[in-house]
């Protein structure tokens, strides 16, 4: 569904998505990178376990929450990808220690 | 010619809607005249406790009245859920008053023991750190203990309000928003209530307008000496369930978010939030529950409690204008069931519940 602008040659970096290595353009936010990588369900809601994905892509809707480097409920559309970043999905309410 | 209702309820908060629902389900024709979106609305900023424990030191009937309502709440919640199809998130597991020092625990125990001597149904248990940790494994090491009372519970105040509105409308009631009442007159037909949407007529009326009652009550020969007392509340992101029991300052909702509160400021008609109080509430919440320190707060808000000089309710029918009632309290959630089930029969012409003997405004005029 999503592809780079025609003619652009993005520089790729490697991140980890649910434990698997994925190469994504370094210019992207985590949300855009996940969409680029084909992810369609970012999380399951705490109450009804309904699937969710980014809606606004600009920090307002809080639908794109993922776990980034062990920090739960991060707004993936507001964080740029970094080499070696570990991203995983929120399945219901976050845990607390 | 416009319809004359049996009852007009002025104010569509938890107090007004509980009474409106109680009247409508008993076959009365009822109109609720509600205020504006910008009105001060305690019912929409509430913490959501259905609380008994510790109440009534100055007048034990207040503790008993709260208990009566708490005992009615399970059936009240079921009825509202059936009528509305909503889940209220109500439970009555008993509540905790957590103490961070020996002195505060002793002071709480002294109070609840005094109340239990007034009425044996106002039960409590004292939990030391070890017993409390069995109930709530997540409590922090500095917690001294807690007073537990089986009479306490909690509920979503927003779903409760919405369910009351849904039930009321399905019972044939008319809810009219943006209809602040500006004048009330009485003639041989009953009451005429002026609003920007026109004049509404009713045989009887109940003033449930919170702080608005100050100006409305004198129009029908009543007195409502109420003042605002601001509370600020924080809510966190949803987290896994860890706190089954409501406490006075921290409670986890059925959906998993955690409400943090218990501030009280005399700042007039200002329902805002301030950084110092928000920070204070956050710090105070981490003491009993250190696991909250890495949890994100997603929102904070303020609301104005509706307080009489002694914090207790006023229930009164006007002597000058019979059929005009005043109801005000600061515990619209806790008392909703009693208002719907015990107050309404009196407004319909039955006996005034004797437990309410103290709750006239004349107690403030000595």
Image (tube, coloured by chain):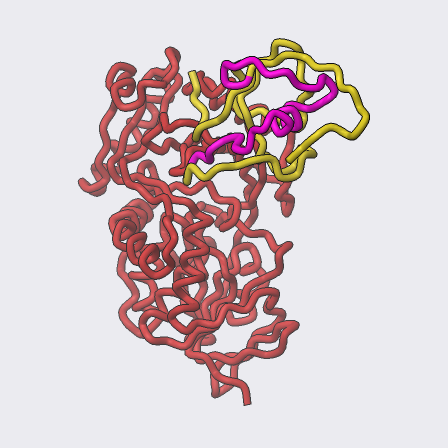
Does residue B61 appear to the left or right of B249 in the view shown? left
- The spot of residue A1 in percent (x, y) is 64, 35
Image location (x, y in percent) of residue B282: 53, 24
* Residue B61 horizontal side relative to residue A44, left or right: left
Pick the residue in front: B153 or A52. A52
For the colour red, the matching chain is B
Q: Position of residue A55 (x, y in %)?
A: 62, 39
Whether B101 is drawn above or below B194: the answer is above
In the image, residue A30 lies in the stretch drawn in magenta: yes
Is residue B104 in sight in this rendering?
yes
Who is closer to the viewer here, B258 or A96?
A96
Query: What segment carries the magenta color?
Result: A17-46
| Quadrant position of residue B166 | bottom left
Label total for image: 0
Residue B366 in view here: no
Which residue is at the front of the view, B95 or B147? B95
- In the picture as drawn, the residue positioned furthest to the front comes out as A7
The reply to whether the magenta stretch includes residue B280 is no
Rendering colour (chain A): yellow
Q: Position of residue B351 (x, y in %)?
A: 27, 69
Reply above or below: B68 against B149.
Answer: below
Give the farthest residue toward the top: A84
At 36% from the left edge and 18% from the top edge, which residue is drawn?
B139
Q: Quadrant of residue B89?
A: top left
- Give the residue at x 19% y 42%: B121
Q: In the rendered image, which quarter is residue B109 located in?
A: top left
């Amino acid at each position: 569904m999503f592809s780079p602008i025609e003619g652009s040659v993005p520089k790729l970096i490697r991140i980890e998505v649910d434990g698997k290595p994925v190469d994504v353009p370094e210019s992207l936010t985590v949300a855009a990178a996940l969409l680029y990588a084909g992810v369609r369900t970012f999380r399951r809601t705490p109450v009804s376990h309904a699937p969710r994905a980014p809606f606004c892509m600009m920090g307002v809707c809080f639908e794109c929450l993922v776990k980034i480097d062990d920090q739960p409920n991060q707004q993936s559309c507001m964080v740029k990808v970094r080499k070696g970043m570990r991203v995983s999905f929120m399945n219901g309410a976050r845990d607390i220690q | 010619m416009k319809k004359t209702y049996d009852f007009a309820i002025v104010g569509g908060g938890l107090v007004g809607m509980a009474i409106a629902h109680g009247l409508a389900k008993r076959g009365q024709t009822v109109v609720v005249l509600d205020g504006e979106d910008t009105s001060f609305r305690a019912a929409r900023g509430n913490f959501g406790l259905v609380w008994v424990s510790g109440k009534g030191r100055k007048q034990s009937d207040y503790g008993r009245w709260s208990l009566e309502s708490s005992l009615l709440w399970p059936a009240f919640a079921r009825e509202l859920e059936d009528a509305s199809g909503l889940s209220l998130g109500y439970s009555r597991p008993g509540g905790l008053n957590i103490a961070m020092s020996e002195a505060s625990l002793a002071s709480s125990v002294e109070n609840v023991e005094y109340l239990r001597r007034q009425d044996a149904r106002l039960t409590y248990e004292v939990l030391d750190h070890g017993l409390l940790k069995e109930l709530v494994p997540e409590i922090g090491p500095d917690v001294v203990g807690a007073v537990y009372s089986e009479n306490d519970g909690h509920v979503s105040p927003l779903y409760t309000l919405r369910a009351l509105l849904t039930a009321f409308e399905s019972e044939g009631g008319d809810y009219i928003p943006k209809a602040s009442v500006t004048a009330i007159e009485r003639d041989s037909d009953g009451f005429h209530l002026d609003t920007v949407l026109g004049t509404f007529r009713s045989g009887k009326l109940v003033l449930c307008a919170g702080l608005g009652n100050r100006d409305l009550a004198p129009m029908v020969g009543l007195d409502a000496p109420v003042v605002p007392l601001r509370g600020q509340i924080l809510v966190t992101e949803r987290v896994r369930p860890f706190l089954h029991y409501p406490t006075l300052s921290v409670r986890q909702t059925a959906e998993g978010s955690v409400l943090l509160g218990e501030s009280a400021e005399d700042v007039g008609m200002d329902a805002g939030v301030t950084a110092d109080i928000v920070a204070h509430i956050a710090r105070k919440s981490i003491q009993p529950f250190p696991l909250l320190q890495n949890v994100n707060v997603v929102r904070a808000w303020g609301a104005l409690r509706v307080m009489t000089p002694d914090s207790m309710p006023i229930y009164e029918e006007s002597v000058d204008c019979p059929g005009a009632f005043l109801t005000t309290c600061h515990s619209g959630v806790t008392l909703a069931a009693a208002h719907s089930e015990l107050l309404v029969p009196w407004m319909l012409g039955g006996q005034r519940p004797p437990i309410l003997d103290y709750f006239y405004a004349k107690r403030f005029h000595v």
